[in-house]
Amino acid sequence: MPAQISSEDQQLSTKIAERLKRDEAGLVAAVVQQFDSKEVLMLGWMDDEALRRTLRSGRVTFFSRSRQEYWRKGDTSGHIQMVKAVALDCDGDALLISVDQHGPACHTGTRSCFDGRALPAFVEPVFVEPVA
């Protein structure tokens, strides 16, 4: 006989779900950060189910906006993310997932998806003479 699963185990905790502010697609941004170095590794998207799976399994699960399916980081590549902590930002519309990253985090093979290709910090101001 299969084990009985409580409704609490099948859904994200109401206390957490009530605090989330989702976009039109029901998703929140999930910033993934290496727990010890604080290096930002990647950005993914989660709905309630992806967050529930992440919290229950201890491995990060995202929702793919392009494929419209769940994917657990590392299932294909072996580059898993072991969850150390999950925090909700002050607005409730973003998560910070602290992980122990095993291998590269980015699908390109780099440690981080933010590999140093920085945008200019600011653009030189353009002054326009007022029209008299």
Image: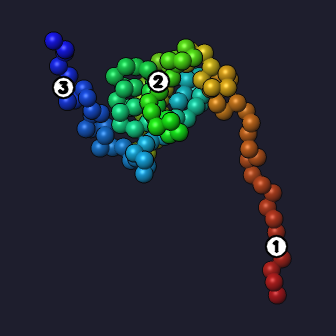
Mark nearer the N terminus (3 vs 2): 3
Please provide percent x and percent y for residue 93.
Answer: 43, 45
- Can residue 95 be seen from the camera position used here? no
- Identify residue type, mark 3: Ser
Please provide percent x and percent y for residue 105.
Answer: 60, 23
Q: Whole-Å distance between the Cαs marked 1 and 2?
A: 52 Å
The image quarter in which residue 9 lies? top left
- Identify residue type, mark 1: Val
The image quarter in which residue 33 lies? top right
Q: Whole-Å distance between the Cαs marked 3 and 1?
A: 66 Å
Residue 6 bears which disc, if any? 3
Please provide percent x and percent y for residue 34.
Answer: 55, 23
User: Compared to 10, does 91 lie above or below?
Assistant: below
Helix or strand or loop: what does disc 3 sit on?
loop
Residue situated in front as seen by the camera: 103 or 19? 103
User: Compared to 4, does 49 lie above or below?
Assistant: below
Mark 1 Cα within 10 Å, few/some/many (few <14, many 20+)? few
Look at the numbered discs 3 and 2 and tell me whether their residues touch, using CB distance below 8 Å: no
Disc 2 marks which residue?
72
Disc 1 marks which residue?
128
State the residue at coordinates (44%, 30%): 70
State the residue at coordinates (20%, 22%): 5
User: Compared to 120, does 64 lie above or below?
Assistant: above
Furthest toward the bottom, the residue is: 132
Mark nearer the N terminus (1 vs 2): 2
Mark 2 Cα within 10 Å, few/some/many (few <14, many 20+)? some
State the residue at coordinates (43%, 43%): 27
Look at the numbered discs 3 and 1 and tell me whether their residues touch, using CB distance below 8 Å: no
Of discs 3 and 1, which sits in the foreground? 3
With 14 as the anchor, is 27 left or right in this view?
right
State the residue at coordinates (50%, 18%): 75
Total tally of numbered discs in the picture: 3
